[in-house]
Amino acid sequence: MQTYRARDVIGFEQDDEGVDVAISDGSSLRARYLVGCDGSRSIVRKTAGIEFPGSEPTMSWLIAEVEWTEEPEWGFRNDDAGTHGIGKGDAGRARMVLTERDGVPKGEPTLRDISEALIGVYGTDFGIHSPSWISRFNDTTRQAATYRAGRVLLAGDAAHIHPPLGGQGLNLGVQDAVNLGWKLAEVVKHEAPQSLLDTYQAERHPIGARVLRNTMAQVALRRPDERTKALGEYLSELFRMDEPRKRWAGEMSGLDIRYDFGEGHPLLGRRMPDLDIVASEGPLRVYSLLHRARPVLIHFGERCRFDMTPWTDRVSSIVAHYEGAWELPVLGTVAAPRAVLVRPDGHVAWVGDGTGDGLADALTTWFGPPAP
Ligand SMILES: Cc1cc2nc3c(=O)[nH]c(=O)nc-3n(C[C@H](O)[C@H](O)[C@H](O)COP(=O)(O)OP(=O)(O)OC[C@H]3O[C@@H](n4cnc5c(N)ncnc54)[C@H](O)[C@@H]3O)c2cc1C
């Protein structure tokens, strides 16, 4: 792999066989596929002509890390603009997030903006000086209309932007990349047809839309008016109950994600739990089997009757033992499967009941047809 630093992608052209990528130093690169992981202002998304529909911002926040001469008021404070927070940063500095009072200003903020915002909230700027960094963000919420245009795909903030409430953006983007990476590798190696790439859109677009929805709801709950406060208190009461709290935690962490692979065992389409299993080489964790980014078929107790020979070049298989409970996030305990086929992204593509029924189809769908 080659990393090119200090130069930008400035455009590309694609044809039936690949993509020519133009670089800012005047050079160009030829690739079979191009994945735009170039952030919210993605030149790749724009050049591909992919629409980025969504909502204009309604709120804005200043963030900064600064030195101070007068000890700040640590913690949160609410006022008629919204919630503000000051916490301890590195080397005694103060880190702050301040809700902006005057709509959604544009441009890079200055130390003076931070100082004025502090005075507006606390009546003093705590003698702040020597900022390590200053920035602002808002609640613009948008999602690419499609994550694929021919040989060009999008992942991360290039595909979706939303306010950072709940800290979900990085998780979402990394999951996009992990979902796409192994599929792209199979297509490039001609192990699977190009149509496998369409499952990237089918699986990840709804997950992105869900994050956009929950962050919009969280922004709405930040409004400082009395009715919104009442709604917030009402929701807090609901979240004292186990079920709503579990469901919310599952969504915020992304641990409840289930891709729609049809009806079946609750594990189907969900993340395989990282169980402590015992295999012929000794005790190990399931996720250690995924380090090679290859699919793995795990038989529990004994091998099911199925001839894996036509897939052994692409799919590992082991027999393992596990005696504990099968606990899934949000769902709780589920029935122990007799075998599972785990994709390289950790999602369960097939669940066995002791027979090999459906296994050939699952292997073909995800990892290509049987070798002759
Ligand atoms: C204030 C704030 C707080 C946040 N807090 C959290 C949090 O707590 N948890 C969380 O999960 N997420 C958080 N996020 C969101 C998270 O930062 C983003 O979702 C994440 O960084 C997106 O990663 P990315 O790689 O897709 O895009 P980016 O991080 O934007 O990276 C894009 C990269 O592409 C490069 N690039 C851009 N254009 C070109 C080009 N033309 N050619 C070559 N390179 C290019 C850029 O230089 C950059 O390195 C926060 C965001 C904000 C604004």
Image (cartoon, rainbow, N blue to C red):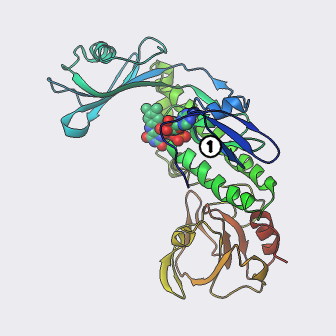
Position of 294 compared to 59: left or right? Answer: right
Horizontal and vertical percent for residue 334? 62, 69
Q: Residue at x 52, y 77 (%)?
A: 324
Q: Dot 1: what SS?
A: loop
State whether label 1 is within 8 Å of ligand 1.
Answer: yes
Q: Is residue 226 above or below residue 234?
A: above
Q: Residue furthest right?
A: 372
**Dividing the picture into quarters, in which one does residue 35 lie?**
top right
Please identify the quadrant where the C terminus is shown: bottom right
Horizontal and vertical percent for residue 134? 35, 25
Please identify the quadrant where the N terminus is shown: bottom right
Horizontal and vertical percent for residue 308? 75, 81
Q: Amino acid at mark 1?
A: Ala
Q: Residue at x 71, y 48 (%)?
A: 33
Q: Is residue 335 above or below residue 175?
A: below
Q: Residue furthest left?
A: 69
Camera-side residue: 87 or 105?
105
Q: Which residue is mark 1?
A: 155
**Dividing the picture into quarters, in which one does residue 120 lie?**
top left
Residue 355 visible within the image:
no
Q: Residue at x 55, y 67 (%)?
A: 273
Q: Residue at x 55, y 81 (%)?
A: 322
Camera-side residue: 29 or 315?
29
